Amino acid sequence: MPTIQDIPRAPGGNPLLGHAGPLVRDPLDFVSSLTGHGPLVRMDMGTKNVVVVCDPALIRQVLLDDRVFDKGGPLFERGREALGNGLITCPHHDHRRLRRLSQPAFHPNRMVGYAAVMTELADDMASGWRDGQVLDVVGEMMALTVEVTVRTLFTDSLPRATASQITDDFLVLMTGFFRRMITPPLLNRLPSRGNRDYTRAIERLRSTVGSIVAARRADESDHGDLLSALCGATGPDGSPGRTETELIDEVLTFLLAGTETTAATLSWAMHLLSQNQEVERQVHREVEAVRSGSRLDFSHLGELETTGNVIKETLRLYPAVWMLTRVTSADADLDGYVLPEGTIVAFSPYAIHRRADLYERAQSFVPDRWRDASVVQDSYLPFSAGARKCMGDRFALTQATLALGTVVSRWRLAPVTDEPLRPSVKASLTPRRLRLRVTVRGERPVGRDSAEGSARESEGE
Ligand code: HEM
């Protein structure tokens, strides 16, 4: 039977560094180019072989067999340093128990309360902008999603100093994440400034969250927040749920999983609307009709079809989680090749989502494609699939839809430059230095407004 060495090797590798060069230089271009080399392609990261799966049916096979294709690979090794054994990073043998214990946190009954926090904070943010202001979009969206996660996790606002300490440490952690994922482990252990900051941020984050968790466990009332749901969950026989360490791991997991991903999605959506004024107008008309003068809330979601489709299409073009990995826990057969135990297997939702043979006008922003339910196909994977599918998908879609609707109801969005926007590819896919000018609806735009007919990017219609 063919072995891993028989899988075609990706071009552009170097004997010493493997494919780290093209991966660092232009990771999106590199992973997209691999889909032209067959269903499975081999690349090298340092001394390790990585099998990149380029065929949606084989990706499903990998995702559905989460016992053999278990969590693992460089991203998860870095993840465990920070998150311990939380839901995202835990191996298969711990997963079912931890997932069941988190289920109550995402019960539909709780979503109504979370949605109220989401729109309140989005409204506060959008009402603080000035007409003509140029926004640092990612910074604004990151501040919003961190605050939403902190408020839905902990209900009562934390002391300002604690909340900003959590945010600062968390941002250091996110910055170090991708760098440490692609650099050899030896470099990660050097006493460099970056490594020291990273370690210190993790330690402080765990200790801050530890104090919050300990205080909450001492107080048994239900605060209606994510933390109460996590603390209150018990095993099937009423046995205690998580240990204190597991609770800290899970709180950090929710913080990490939910903030940068949702902020990136919202930022890309705002960028795409600024380039596609007709879609922006449709979203505005829809939001105004649905909210009829009041603040958006959970009950409006079903009617926000166009706004929801903008988010879905944004996640197709710019899936925040652009690359995922697994490690085989036993010898495995994939597409007729034997992958020995310990093989790293990867796939890229970004590359799959942009394949012309899977999506019509694959590079274009076409939210309306989602009106046709049959388009929802196996090759749409922004939240992954199978038992390890994102647990916060509803939470994320709710937040992104309500926040985008809230922004568009007040402001028109316009680019401030014709320069093409470049993605910043770290742990998640984020627009690099995205600036947009906001102008009040119904008034003449201030300064440069390419609203009608600006130069469009390749994805612009
Ligand atoms: C647009 C925003 C988001 C995107 C694109 C996203 C994407 C993903 C993806 C792709 C995975 C699967 C990882 C894998 O298969 O290895 C995942 C897992 C997970 N996500 Fe999300 N996520 C988002 C928001 C959220 C939010 C808001 C939360 C929580 C509040 C969350 C919590 C989780 C958890 C707990 C898991 C682990 C699930 C498990 O293994 O059982 N995510 N997410």
Image (cartoon, rainbow, N blue to C red):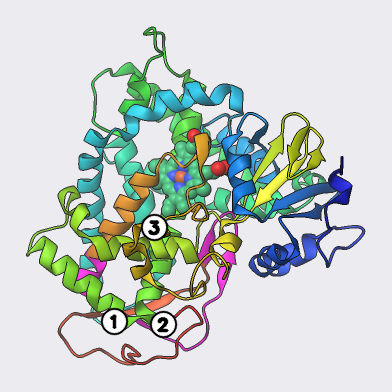
Q: CA distance from mark 1 to mark 2?
A: 10 Å
Q: Could you tell me the amino acid type at mark 3?
A: Ser
Instruction: Give residue 425's position: percent from left, percent from top.
Output: 60, 63
Instruction: Kindly check if marks 2 and 3 are in contact, taking CB atoms under 8 A apart as contact.
Output: no
Q: Could you say which disc has been placed on residue 278 in the image?
A: 1
Q: In this figure, which residue is indicated by the disc labeled 2?
A: 461
Q: Could you tell me the amino acid type at mark 1?
A: Glu
Choose between 347 and 101: the one closer to the eye: 347
Mark before the other along the chain sequence, 2 or 3: 3
Mark before the other along the chain sequence, 1 or 2: 1
* Identity of the residue furthest to the left in this view: 293
Q: CA distance from mark 2 to mark 3?
A: 22 Å
Choose between 126 and 283: the one closer to the eye: 283
Q: Is residue 321 magenta?
A: no
Judging from the image, what secondary structure is the residue with disc 1 in? helix
Q: In this figure, which residue is indicated by the disc labeled 3?
A: 374
Q: Could you tell me the amino acid type at mark 2?
A: Glu
238 displayed left or right of 59? left
- Classify mark 2: residues with Cα within 10 Å, few (<14), some (14-19) or many (20+): some
Q: For the residue with label 2, is its CB less than 8 Å from the closest atom of ligand 1? A: no
Q: CA distance from mark 3 to mark 1?
A: 25 Å
Instruction: Give residue 47's position: percent from left, percent from top.
Output: 86, 48
Q: Residue at the location (57% across, 48% down)?
A: 173
Q: Residue at the location (70% across, 42% down)?
A: 73
Choose between 251 and 307: the one closer to the eye: 307
Q: Which residues are magenta?
A: 406-430
- Classify mark 3: residues with Cα within 10 Å, few (<14), some (14-19) or many (20+): few
Where residue 354 sits, quadrant-wise, is: bottom right
